[in-house]
Amino acid sequence: PELSLGACDQNSLKGEYLNKAKIADGGKKLRKNWTSTWVVLEDNRLFFYKESKQEALASLKQGCKSETVDLCGALVGWTTEKSSRKHVFQITTSCGQEFLLQGDNYPTICKWHDAIKKTAEALSKL
Ligand code: I3P
């Protein structure tokens, strides 16, 4: 399986395109703008890339920008109030960033929700 379950293991999920909207930064509300984003969970860290090829370029240290989300202390939960879309969950980071992630395929978005939530909870216990 892609997701390792051991307590001391580093949670990782191979990249996939999900719909992402950042709705707050530093506790300040932002205008919602859904974009298709290449999402990677690697060694307990969450990365957002504009496109999949940027992940490969980043690993070659060609300075490709990703947005890294600090999951330590983050809260992760499903929401039906923050969007009219189906299958949306929210990540609220300890520094006040709020992201919505959405996918039409329920098993896929569940897998991401579960892995990100589990990672955030594991990091918070360290
Ligand atoms: C927003 C856009 C979003 C919608 C959001 C709208 O309008 O339609 O897709 O979110 O609803 O405000 P605009 O493009 O003019 O900013 P959902 O698709 O998640 O429902 P909201 O204001 O209720 O968040």
Image: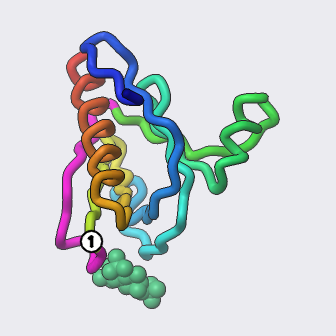
Residue tagged by mark 1? 86
Position of residue 43 measured from the top left corner of the image (x, y, whole percent): 46, 23
| Quadrant that contains the C terminus | top left
- Residue extending farthest right: 62
Say if the magenta span includes residue 78.
Answer: yes
Position of residue 63 measured from the top left corner of the image (x, y, whole percent): 77, 37
Q: Nearer the viewer, residue 28 or 123?
A: 123
Q: Nearer the viewer, residue 6 or 99?
A: 6
Q: Residue at x 34, y 22 (%)?
A: 4
Which element carries disc 1, helix, strand or loop?
loop
Residue 121 in view in this figure: yes
Q: Which residues are magenta?
A: 72-85
Say if the magenta span includes residue 79.
Answer: yes
Q: State which quadrant residue 5 falls in.
A: top left
Looking at mark 1, is its residue's CB closer than 8 Å to ligand 1? no
- In the image, ligand 1 is in what quadrant? bottom left
Neighbours of disc 1 within 10 Å: few (<14), some (14-19), many (20+): few
- Residue extending farthest top: 8
| Quadrant that contains the N terminus | top left
Q: Residue at x 32, y 30 (%)?
A: 72
